[in-house]
Image (cartoon, rainbow, N blue to C red):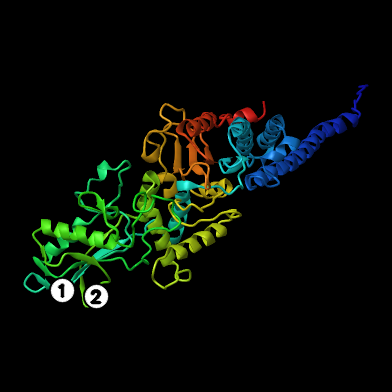
Amino acid sequence: MNMRVDVVAAPVRYRRMPLVLLLLIAIVPTVILAAAYLRLDREADRYDARVEALATSSLGEPGDLDDLDDALSAAEVAAAARRAALSTSLFQYRRIPGPSADLANAIELRSEVRPVFGFLNEESCVAVSANGLDVAGHNPDRAVVPASVQKVLVAAVALEVLGPDYTFTTSVRTPLPVDGVVEGDVYLVGGGDPLLTSDDYPIDEDRYPAFSTTSLDVLADAFVANGITRIRGTVIGDGTRYDDEFVVEGWGPGVAFDSAGPYDALLVNDARVLGRGQADDPNRGAARELARLLGNRDVRVDDGWGSGQAATNTQVIGTVESAPLSEIVREMLTTSDNNTAEMLVKEIGRADAGASETAGIGTRAAGLTVIDRTLRTWGVPMAGVRVLDGSGLHLENRLTCAALLHVLQRAPGTAVASGLPLAGETGTLSDEFIGSPVAGRLFAKTGTLNNPPVGEPPPAAKSLAGFVTSPAGGTIEFAIILNAAELPEPTYRQIWAEFATRFSTFPAITDVTTLGPQ
């Protein structure tokens, strides 16, 4: 008898506790990480909002970098940056430590420049920003005498109103010639070109030679091209595009007909004529120069030269067009061209029919109205600002460093930025900052007014405003306007040098990874 034993295995029963533990091990860290993410995300949002608020604040207003003294130390900035970077590396890529580095660098720059304020009096102002973030200021809202840095405003508004490609056209008009003879007057009609120049004019003898000039000889050649050999009349200069204000009444003693003016819509060689004398009437001076060039081409002019308005029964026999406005602005800023600045103010006014006192005629008053309106449209703080001319030579001009800095912050990528003199190399800065760590990196408009007699208002002014670029990336924008009874060269150069030394170390933090998770 076979005895078979069937072994039936009982079902194995596993304990439930290990499975629950496994689930908890999987879920709990996820919950913790999610909670950490949400917290870090909220913290980063607050931090980003703080950076944005600081970036959009104005010097001296609530929310600028001065508020950080009580709210956020430099160490806390770095810690906030690390937290933001940690959030990015764990969960997303939208947050980077760049804004944190910008803020930390701004605070470092502020600590560098503030000691220099101790060298300044209360009649001067300074405003500094880094990558558009306001950093520090000394009386930034004080209205001071700006001198030639006022041209920055004119340049910026001209580019805005007229456009960088805008050009000026000068023409010559004559009655119909018969057998090479013109019976009557011929007209040189100005179109507002501030750089109309004879080819043989000795530009290189000027301290800061003009460039991007327009050749008057082209118009003299037009007479020859049209077969004209004799003019039985007068060469008339026509500058009626603008009014007849050739100089500004509010300039200081000795400025008119020397540092600036006379100018009109027709201007040749800055109204200087053969022998480097200067004509009282720029239109008459321009006509005289054209008559000289015609004589050099064997074109006889019977009755000399004069000024007036072109007759309607004449025809255009030749034109010459200026360089684009962007190039004219560069020339004005690099060489500090006073006549160009004043002519641009009138052209701005002429372009705005609503502001012009007489439709179609450029006036200083109309141009200044447009400048004021445009600056306000840009949000420039205008309290105390008074712009009375284009060159900055008017004794009653007033400008704040905060307003000037605001305009400079709009300038990158425009002819304003590219036209500023370069330290140690070009224009009015060619002899400045030689051997300095900012040589070749500081672009700035200068300004100088002595305003004698010493000790009587208005004060002397020495100005410097522009940008410092860094090889490591980033840009400092600055406006420095010194006002005092006297500003001898050793004084202002020492102050400039102190700022330059501190600007040269920016940015202090060049590797943003140092602000990230360690």
* Quadrant in the rendering for residue 6: top right
User: Label for residue 311?
Assistant: 2
The CA distance from mark 1 to mark 2 is 10 Å
Residue 176, position in %: x, y? 14, 74
State if disc 2 and disc 1 touch (CB < 8 Å): yes
Q: Check disc 2 and report its element: helix, strand or loop.
A: loop
What's the amino acid at mark 2?
Ala
Q: Which residue is mark 1?
A: 184
Residue 49 seen from this side = yes
Q: Quadrant of the C terminus?
A: top right
Q: Residue furthest left?
A: 179
Q: Nearer the viewer, residue 399 or 406?
A: 399
Q: Earlier in the sequence, mark 1 or mark 2?
A: 1
Q: Quadrant of residue 311?
A: bottom left
Q: Is residue 24 above or below residue 294?
A: above
Q: Is residue 81 above or below residue 397?
A: above
Residue 22 location (% of width, % of height): 83, 31
Q: Position of residue 304 (x, y in %)?
A: 16, 64
Identify the element where label 1 is drawn: loop
Left or right: where does residue 134 sit relative to residue 263? Answer: right
